[in-house]
Image (spheres, rainbow, N blue to C red):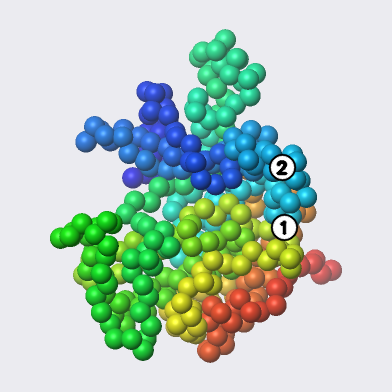
Amino acid sequence: EDFGQLLDGVREAIARGVQPTINAQGSSGSYFCRVFDHQSADIRTVGIFKPKDEEPYGKLNPKWTKWLHRNCFPCFFGRGCLIPNLGYVSEAAAFLLDRRLGLNIVPRTEVVYLASPSFYYTRKDRMQSLRHLEAGLPPKQGSFQEFVHGYMDANRFFAQCPWIDDDISNGKIAIADAVLPSGSTSPINQLQWTSELKQQFREEVEKLVVLDYLMRNTDRGMDNWMIKVLATARLHLHIAAIDNGLAFPWKHPDQWRSYPYGWLRLPRTLLDRPFSERTRKLLLPMLTSRDWWQRTVTELRQLFQQDEDFNERMFACQLSVLKGQAWNLVKCLREPAEGPLQLCERVAAVVIDENVQ
């Protein structure tokens, strides 16, 4: 489905009274957006919208616990390595970087404008919308990410499908009846950790490792990346990396709050392997290409410039961290014996571009 048509469907649903619903989880205002399915006459969720002014530092953040945290304990609020109120751009930038790298694990995410009575507005905005019904509520700028269906978060997946170490014989994974009834035809009911499936999943995890490392994601747990079992000619697993709003820092995190990557808690036999040849062949030509970097930086700048508080100096700092991470990644990919664990052990670096006369 075309992204523009998807947004038009959301706006049509809002106009007909099907309002986005707030997500109770998280520290900011985020909303599940829905559309009418004209074929089935049902209402289905198609995306999640995160307005800029309802982020943790936003003036209209709807979570009272975060308001209390921000106003009463400011020294312990937020992440000093991140630029405030830029999470919505980070979400879209993660998608941009994902597509530039050819990883295809981030659902499509764009910066859009939406208006709905279910969003948080000032009293003034609501009163003006009542006096000027045709104008309505002012649209909010934020990120819109397509909703992924048929996935489960990594915690739940591994609870149902424990990773089998290489020294344990392969076997069919039993699925709890409470999750999948007996006789279910879902592909996950047939999942078996064969050597082929293990290698395919390792390569998927490598994509997540690369993406999170490059954009220095400070909020990757085991509950905000998803896994789906797909049955085509053979079973294979696909990862969706969602919730990327706390990435692209302007400096590396401080030592006392290092924000480790959640996937480091995966079984060691899954991570403690050299990067696959497929991953090396995919990434090294791009990450060592001047043309690739010029285009990527140009597109990132155009995206970040959509924010009204864009600051060129801070953007340069963000690029320094991104390029420092890429420097480490390239060195790691060029070492045949190194993999995700060795990558995370490398000393944090920054790359500063200077004009040479």
Choose mark 1 or mark 2, whichever is in front.
Answer: 2
**Left or right: 41 with respect to 318?**
left
In which quadrant will I find the C terminus? Answer: bottom right
Name the residue at 68% across, 58% down: 249
Residue sitting at the far right: 357
Name the residue at 70% across, 77% down: 347
In the figure, 46 relative to 91: above or below? Answer: above
Q: Percent x, y for residue 310?
A: 71, 45
Residue sitting at the far left: 183
In the figure, 160 relative to 330: above or below? Answer: above
**Left or right: 79 with respect to 42?**
right
Name the residue at 53% across, 35% down: 113
Q: Name the residue under label 1.
A: 81
> Would you say residue 275 is visible in this rendering?
no
Q: Percent x, y for residue 289?
A: 59, 72
Q: How crowded is mark 1: few (under 14 residues within 10 Å), some or many (20 or more)?
A: some
Q: Name the residue under label 2.
A: 70
From the viewer's side, name the closer residue of 77 and 218: 77
Q: Element type at marker 1?
A: loop
